[in-house]
Amino acid sequence: MTERMILDNAFNEGDKDASNYSINKADPGKPASLTWKRKLNGEGRVPSMFTLTFQEKLHMAPIGIRLWQLIREQSTKGRQVIINPFAKRYITSCQGVPLGGVGAGSIGRSYKGEFQRWQLFPRICEDKPVLANQFSVFVSRSNGEKYSSVLCPASPELVKEDAVSGIGSWDWDLKGNNSTYHALYPRAWTVYEGEPDPALKIICRQISPVIPDNYKESSFPVSAFTFTLYNTGKTTAEVTLLFTWANSVGGISEFSGQHSNSKIMMKDGVHGVLLHHMTTDGLPPMTFAIAAQETDGVRISECPCFLISGNSQGITAKEMWQEIKEHGSFEHLRFTEASVPSEPGSSIGAAIAASLTIPSDSVRTVTFSLAWDCPEVNFLGGKTYHRRYTKFYGTDGDAAANIAHDAILEHSRWESLIEAWQRPILEDKRLPEWYPVTLFNELYYLNSGGTIWTDGLSPVHSLVSIGGRKFSLDRSQLGLKSIIDVPNNQNDTAIDILGRMTSILEQIHTPIASNSAFGTNLLQEGEENIGQFLYLEGIEYHMWNTYDVHFYASFALIMLFPKLQLSIQRDFAAAVMMHDPSKIKLLNDGKWVPRKVLGAVPHDIGIDDPWFEVNAYCLYDTDRWKDLNPKFVLQVYRDVVATSDKKFAQAVWPSVYVAMAYMDQFDKDGDGMIENDGFPDQTYDTWSVSGVSAYSGGLWVAALQAASALACEIGDKGSEDYFWYKFLKAKAVYQKLWNGSYFDYDNSGSSTSSSIQADQLAGQWYARACGLFPIVDEDKARTTLEKVYNYNVLKVKDGKRGAVNGMLPDGRVDMSSMQSREIWSGVTYAVAATMIHEDMVDVAFHTASGIFEAVWSEEGLGYSFQTPEAWNIDDQYRSLAYMRPLAIWAMQWALSRPKLPKQEPAPEVKADSLRIHHAGFSKVARFLKLPEDQGSRSILQAVFDYTCKRMLI
């Protein structure tokens, strides 16, 4: 593949409707043509966490001490910090495709069959499996043969279970050596080949409704499981499939008591059990629904409650299991309709059974579903939002049964749409086999990244969010007397009080809301509010929509859910115009700085009070970072190119102009090029850079061109010419970093200035992706990428780990910082995308294949479905399950060659003709200028930092 590949399913401009795909009914019993596979008895390599060198420990000691102090301080308030490297996590290499749509909570599932990694509430991730949640099979043949087993290999943790009455008494007989798991997100298939019955092949297909350009079903908290059973034996088989589910959200609230279960019968023959969970720690209640459909030949029966452990009423887990073994159903069980809440210290579950007869050489299918309903999203800042799916099912918390019902009826249509989307890529023989599988499976993060998708409406406030403001509910004209006088006794005091509260809180918060990063305020007339979207930087790095990282990951959203990408962009456009002078303390040096200043693109949209309190990150002062503003401008232009949305372009243009003007202060010598300030003032936040740099400088050059192109789109001719002039000026300075074979890391003349940075052409990458003119000559770009390939890729683990961030010209890894010696999975994908844009397709795939080898291959490092931000040359990871690896979709963007507007070279603009525009731009820039960084370190701190630097030389 020496010439650029153009895929048949090329990405088209504008929104695509899923109905436009070529739809054929999919066979749930047949795995996709290409999948990620594991044997159920396979044990992957347990991931190994990173360690610091002695120099790194010394250098980062002040940060570590302040972080430890912050952790202790926040824990006394019942709060978490954004990063806690001291916390211990449950780590496994057995992750598989998670359950649920996008932004409604996530339940992980291992390839062995365990339900684990529970992320149902903001920031809370319960990694350990709930072992009572299982599918099981019972077979009785006419010749007297009987088989029964949980469809999951036995876990060592079962030894701790009560074998007398608990789930340890179940038949955990599945070996797993003949059973294979297949994954292709958002679907997975488990093929039980003659286990436990040698003459019965069972295929379980798991599906969640993650469908491109679908903004309804994709938000649903549900998964469907279709079992296809092939009886290859000579005798008829009586088979019962059992789905058991604990009343648990993961963690200790399973044992807190007051949980209850109840049967429900729905239309279309759908039977179910509801599990009502009274969550602890002030979290909102949750209801689960497990369901199955009764059809010709399939009988459904339920056990609404059984005791897993403790002293609550009801039959035990052992008795429930024995009932199925003896009778093949729950039809002989008698339950009272009244549901008795569980006792504290007890754990309860529910079960639903599908019983059917399968003659010899016959095939039958059964479908189960799992849904959950928790309409509220509560943040510690005191605001409550409703999830996107409540637009279709309501906000009362009683929708789980309806969601489960609809999944059983609609899952076949979902699968047809998903297969139509994926099939062209899977069948393209020009692609290496590992690529399509990895491309789709990396999308797991849209579900498992702590994702929240709201209905887009303003939040409901609580007293927590009011602070010290005075108010009185008596301001309402509706008094208690008038309620009492309501005719026909149709009154509700609670409704009245809540109405008063809502009215007062709206009055109090109206001016505050206008000073937030609530991008829905930028929606133009006739534009749909599809909600707001949050996802964490990583499940260990708690910041919503971390923007320097989203820069890489956003290709997945703009290609698959463009309206969600535009929603995020509107939020950040609104945030640019925010000014929040409240102080935050930096971990780097202990200084207090404003949370967010006017004109700066925030690092993130916040954590405890997203949109209203941005910049949860506090390691460095991100108002002085050099990459965030250019990344905003580049993404905006790319998104306009992708969607042709002129209303969006016009709405965010003022923020783009302000963001560019804000950066003017970092051009210290007036040559048109910004300079880095000698600290890690960009996404590589432990890797210092000073002066003109390849990374930030290239982003700035590309952003100037993008600003000019965007001005052209909205008809601002003066700004178009002005930014084009500045682009040409900065581009000329940038070329001075060229040393004959690549662009120097920076021009400071330090010992690391000549480091070969893998990501040095980030600006060139985005310029190409947007259809802009390249910021460097084609031959220089190709020569640089060849250097990166030969050094950063091939000199590390024989090219089987990706591109190391920094490499010295003599072929040694740059050990000057923790991050220079790391391989970043998302950056490697981005480098590969850059290579594709420069028609180096074979080299691109070989570069990216190193990420496949480390993350997804059977001989890899155990990172599947939890791709980390980084690993070092010792194969030690940092930050599992991270946002940036979604950048593999930047490769797909480059391969599919979206239709981009043809750029015509602008005529040379003379500086004299731009005097008026320069004067206006300069006035805005002066208004936005930060005060000089005075530095407030103590003498002791200064001496310590100086000593550390000397020891690192």
Image (tube, grey):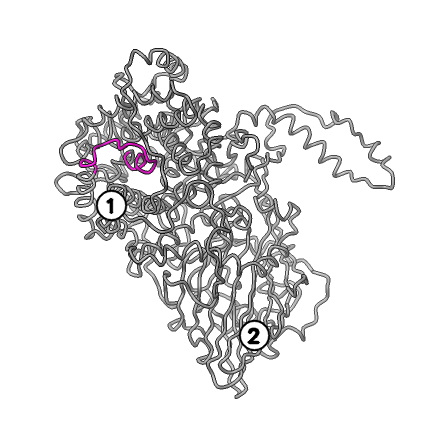
Residue type, numbered disc 1 = Ala
The picture places residue 8, in percent across and down from the top left corner, at 36, 51
Q: Is residue 236 above or below residue 902?
A: below
Q: Residue at x 59, y 42 (%)?
A: 386
Count of numbered badges drawn on the protein: 2
Q: Which mark is residue 76?
A: none
Q: Which mark is residue 803?
A: 1
Q: Circle 2 sits in a helix, a strand or a loop, which is it?
A: strand
The picture places residue 681, in percent across and down from the top left corner, at 32, 29
Asked where in the image residue 429 lies, by quadrant, the reply is bottom left
Q: Circle 1 sits in a helix, a strand or a loop, which is it?
A: loop
Of 43 and 598, nearer the camera is: 598
Decide which of tag 1 and tag 2 comes sooner along the chain: 2
Q: Is residue 128 magenta?
A: no
Q: Is residue 368 above or below residue 695?
A: below
Q: Residue at x 21, y 49 (%)?
A: 2
Segment colored magenta? 764-781
In the picture, which quadrant includes the C terminus?
A: top left
The picture places residue 747, in percent across and down from the top left corner, at 20, 27
Left or right, 294 with reference to 440: right
Between the residue at mark 1 and the residue at mark 2, the CA separation in whole angstroms equals 51 Å
Q: Is residue 768 magenta?
A: yes
- Label 2 belongs to which residue? 240
Label 2 CA crowd tier, 10 Å (few <14, some 14–19, many 20+): many
Q: Is residue 31 above or below residue 501?
A: below
Left or right, 420 with reference to 316: left
